[in-house]
Amino acid sequence: MLTDLKPQPADKILALMEAFRADPRETKIDLGVGVYRNAEGVTPVMRAVKAAERQLVETQETKAYTGLAGDPAYAAAMRGLILGDAAPADRIAAVATPGGTGAVRQGLELMQYADRAATIWLSAPTWPNHPSIVRYLGVPMKEYRYFDDATRMVDFDGMMADLAGVKAGDLVLLHGCCHNPTGANLTEEQWQTVADHLEKTGAIPFIDIAYQGFGDGLDEDAYGTRLLASRLPEVIIAASCSKNFGVYRERTGLLMAIAPNTKARGEAQATLAFLNRQNYSFPPDHGARVVQMILDTPELRQDWASELEDVRLGMLDLREQLASALRQRTNSDRFDFIAGHRGMFSRLGATPEQVAAMREEHGIYMVGDSRMNIAGLNAATVPILADAIVAAGV
Ligand code: LMR
């Protein structure tokens, strides 16, 4: 059996992480994997996370299993954070999952369980693990245009023209905020147009929200998700706490399914618990409990939100610095889109050869499609990157 295994295509983000680790140059700069780093290059444990963990060590009496859906208090706290009161709780099924990836996977499994004929529509481009999981599960997949290579902003006309092809019951995967890999996001007006279209066609939004709080603010980043949740009968939401709580390795995610009525909600809840059981039984609890404690304890929540806000503003400042360094070097505003993008990433628009040249000659690691992790920069490396971008002829 083991000799029959075929090699799998490498995940380009994880392969880049390995290549960066193997590079001996001290001056190398990691703009690859989507992990937040502060100016010292450290991914810190957030203050509120440390405080909640301390409290947990002192007060937790048992490590016995939680329920199959995870702790309902975690789901309720996350529901409030993501949806506010956009949809009634008695229509929302939810399960804790191992990270955002686990949530995406369980959402797709739910879709397959309900209707194997439906198609999922992915933005072109999207996070590479989306099509990878979709293909692995054998779910029919189509793409819709999303990014305009010339302006480096959303190709909204192309997107809507492609989404004209959706059928009732199809799922449309949308990034709730901070689009990965481009950094280009829908405006509030564009979200309204998407909502109108989904409402008219009966297609179902599948929202992946992994960077809430990294773009324009916690509530602002939930705008599109809340709009769809308030208007449509069915919405699937895969959420990650990896980035905004900095609990990457704890694998803390949530899958929510908004159902048209309470009866369908009950069936969705039972199916999600069943799917958890088939795949890993009980979801991990430590990260979820820490997140729930933070969200439900006013002082911890305030401290978390304020640290997250500092992270967000720091990334915005780096965006401004890079756009301005490139403005000076090129005497043009053609890189101003970097300041207009939101979240951890920007797609620079460099060719694979230019990306390779920046890696080989300057030790700058970005994903092959020229996705840069803005949080991998600091005031000292911004000018180095700007020089390399110009030298590569981007
Ligand atoms: C990324 O896009 O770099 C992150 O979401 C990490 C990952 O798992 O790919």
Image (tube, helix red, strand yellow):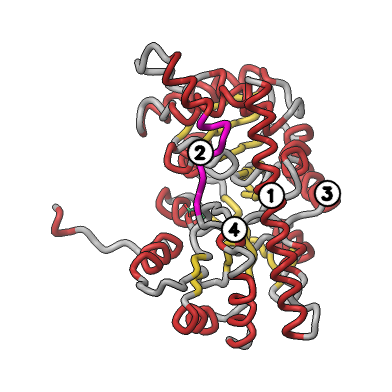
190 above or below 111? below
Is mark 4 in CB contact (under 8 Å) with mark 3? no
Residue at 58% in and 86% down: 392
Q: Is residue 244 visible?
A: yes
**Mark 1, residue position:** 312
Q: Which residue is mark 3?
A: 188
Mark 1 or 3, closer to the camera: 1
Determine the residue positioned at 47% across, 84% down: 361
Q: Disc 4 to disc 1, how far (Cα)?
A: 10 Å
Amino acid tagged 4 = Ala
Tell me the kind of residue under disc 1.
Answer: Arg
Q: Where does residue 367 sit, x and y in percent of width and height?
A: 51, 68
Residue extent of the magenta highlight? 42-50
Q: Earlier in the sequence, mark 4 or mark 1?
A: 1
Frontmost of labels 1 and 2 is 1
Q: Which residue is mark 4?
A: 375
User: Is there any visible trace of residue 109 in the rendered image?
Assistant: no
Check disc 2 and give the amino acid type: Ala
For mark 2, give the secondary structure: helix
Q: Position of residue 287 (x, y in %)?
A: 47, 31
Local crowd size for mark 2, using a 10 Å CA cut-off: few (<14), some (14–19), many (≥20):
many
